Image (cartoon, grey):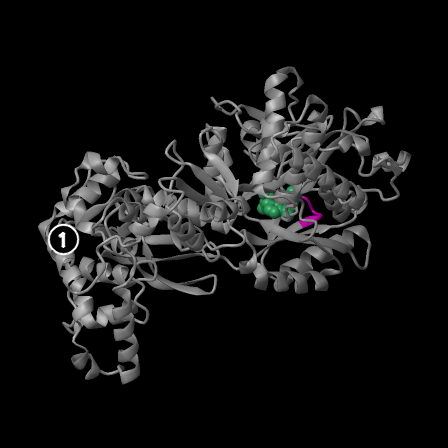
Amino acid sequence: MDNNKEIMALQQESIEILKDLQVNTPCDLSKLDLLKKILRFHEHRYYIINDPFISDFEYDLLYNSLKIIEVAHPNLITVDSPTQRVGSSINKSFETVQHLVPMLSLENSYDADDLMDWDRKAKEQSNLSVIEYCIEPKFDGASISLIYENDLLVRGTTRGDGVEGEDITNNIKQIRSIPLSAPFSKYGIKQIEIRGEIVMTKVSFTKYNENLISQGLSPLANPRNAVSGSLRMKDPKEVAKRNLEAFLYHVSYYVLERIPSTANRLPKVGELFDNQQATVNGNQSTVNPFTTHSNSLNLLWNLGFRSPQKEKQVVEGIEEVIKHVHDFELMRDTLPYEIDGMVIKVNDFALQERLGMTTHHPRWAIAFKFKARQATTKLLGVEFQVGRTGAVTPVAKLSPVQVGGVTVSSISIHNKEYIKEKDLQIGDTVLIERAGDVIPQIVKSQPELRTGEEVPIEFPKQCPVCKSELFKEEGEAVWRCVNIECEAQVVEKIIHFVSKDAMDIKSMGDANVRKFYELGLLKDIPGVYTINFAEVATTEGFGKKSIDNLTAAIEASKQQPLYRLIYGLGIRFVGETTAKVLANAVEHLLDFATKTEEDLQKLDDVGVKVAKSIYYFFSNEQNIAMLHQLETLGLQLKNTKKATVASGGLQDQTFLFTGTLSKLKRSEAEALAEQHGGKIVSSVSSKLNYLVVGEDAGSKLEKAKKINTIKIITENEFLELVKEENI
Ligand code: IVH
């Protein structure tokens, strides 16, 4: 699809259709095939080329109009329609199936000498003095094989034992960078098996782990494990949420339509083109795509696959290979996904065939492994840290060890379940992994190396800091210190209170809070406003200028809007958005002291759990006393903004922003909506009036589409809305 004319035509046609759709003129049946083609084109721009031509919102408009036609004419739904990825039925089990060609693994090399040896053998065997190689990243994910027949994706399989794998077709179809159909027939290919790797980007992996941790579940050690687990999920819809991506790097088998003799055997490399010319886009193709590996990657790319076409490098001779793999290793951390090395392949297919295979691996390819990001070390002890909410987290203290260029000496081991799952004891030898810039994790312990001197990890019954008894709520994995005066919690709470998204007291920071606390100059949140600066001036490191800055920042924070104060109080489950909802729900913050859990649950964005937590906070006498104290100190507990809000024309309309906005920052857009009387909510529900979608909108948009009372609008439409309302 690199043909410029075709691209322009498809984009033009998209614009024409979108014009109609935006004035609510639906597409008719005659547009069915065109819509599918257009949607595939935009999926390709988005998922393969990473350069979308239209917004997600516009894509959704097109997608919905295809859906409308298909609902009216179900007999016209084709298996490769873009609508057919979603909604695959639950996988009952994954059938074991045989690969068309066994999936061999690769020989490994670790240094220049290994590569020189390998090259020497290949040269000897082929009688050549220099060999051309194609080098590409070794993607660190889970390998898969795909079969396309008559241009349609018919099967997707895990590697399994290399001979047989599991049929995971339904799940594979959820990965948007894998085309459901591709025009192989243009090349005379009737059936083809392609291999590749499914990966999860580092960003998606971090989010995935954060989500697991927030649910009290154990995080995974690396994106590879996250991918393997994801591919075997029972519900394909869950797979779709995991943001998996696919790189296809190897054609292992193909059957040609026009050479019947090849139909029941492995074709000879390039056979089609020895006998006849293929036609590409109706023109005679002059390039034989199956003569070299690099051409096969180009072919896959042109067919709409994400092959490492841009990442590959063709070089002459092993010295160039050695230089390139070392250069690439330096860039490793700049890639959005994990790679664990490079794969070097003999570029010429005819030469590949001459070199052949051993029983384990091809002689024409080798993996060059990068420096390990795993290391073995000793678990010396466990420290228990108390967070702002009183959560007690065990942190493993390790004998310091280098992993991928970074020294690691402590790692969070999350909770009791995690410790049990990984079978950790003090004194154990543990394998740790640092996946790129991702936080290090323990992969496993090595109980087989135990000497008998190891000690089980005992969870404290009392808070390690204030010694009060710890509690665990039912269904939660976390043990908590519930003493609100606990020193550790108090310090963390003050740090949160002054932080950027809360009261934003610049130049206060973690270090100063800790210092003032240790000096006895700060002991609770109201204390921020009564710090004895005369005394601070006598301590080292505080000049007049820094004290002036600090006092000015503290004074300025008194005017922060109510929602920042609410957020800064650190009430459990009350994030920024809920804080805004709360701020808008009352005239004065202390009004919450008279609200019941039921009252609270009526607010947008406030469920049973959140209501309980807010109620608990405002039922506590010490908290109420603290709020009175803050008011006396000059903080704003009244909702001064509410008066403005009340006059706004968007009064009581709820807004949610999703995706990346191009003109406004998220916070600016939210403030704008509020200035006009709107309310911000954080989740999609029937209480939502407007979902404003920017680029990369994800699950919120999907969810909103199912609730037909929600108005889905673009950023421009939102700006129009506030403008109109202004007049
Ligand atoms: S080629 C017959 N190319 O590495 C050769 N493999 O250790 C087929 N891998 O099982 C493999 N990136 O899962 C090839 N660019 C790449 C690769 C790659 C990752 C994986 C693949 C294979 C394993 C071998």
Left or right of 207? Residue 83 is: right
Q: Position of residue 590 (x, y in %)?
A: 17, 50
Q: Main secondary structure of the magenta part?
A: loop
Ligand 1 contact, mark 1 (Cβ < 8 Å): no
Q: Residue 628: which quarter of the image?
A: bottom left
Does residue 414 show up? no
Position above or below: 234 against 564: above
Is residue 599 inside the magenta stretch?
no
Magenta span covers which residues?
Answer: 361-365
Q: Position of residue 164 (x, y in %)?
A: 58, 29
Residue under the point 27% across and 82% down:
541
Q: Position of residue 516 (x, y in %)?
A: 20, 72
Return the residue at label 1: 623
Q: Residue furthest front?
A: 727
Q: Residue 484: which quarter of the image?
A: bottom left
Tell which of 679 and 455 is nearer to you: 679
Left or right of 689? Residue 253 is: right
Q: Quadrant of ligand 1?
A: top right
Residue under the point 81% across and 44% down:
291
Left or right of 324? Residue 639 is: left
Identify the secondary structure beneath mark 1: helix
Is residue 363 inside the magenta stretch?
yes
Q: Residue 533: which quarter of the image?
A: bottom left
Left or right of 354? Residue 16 is: left
Q: Amino acid at mark 1?
A: Asn
Q: Residues within 10 Å of mark 1 (few under 14, many from 20)?
A: some
Position above or below: 657 against 429: above
Position above or below: 165 against 722: above
Tell which of 496 and 292 is nearer to you: 496
Tell which of 208 and 718 is nearer to you: 718
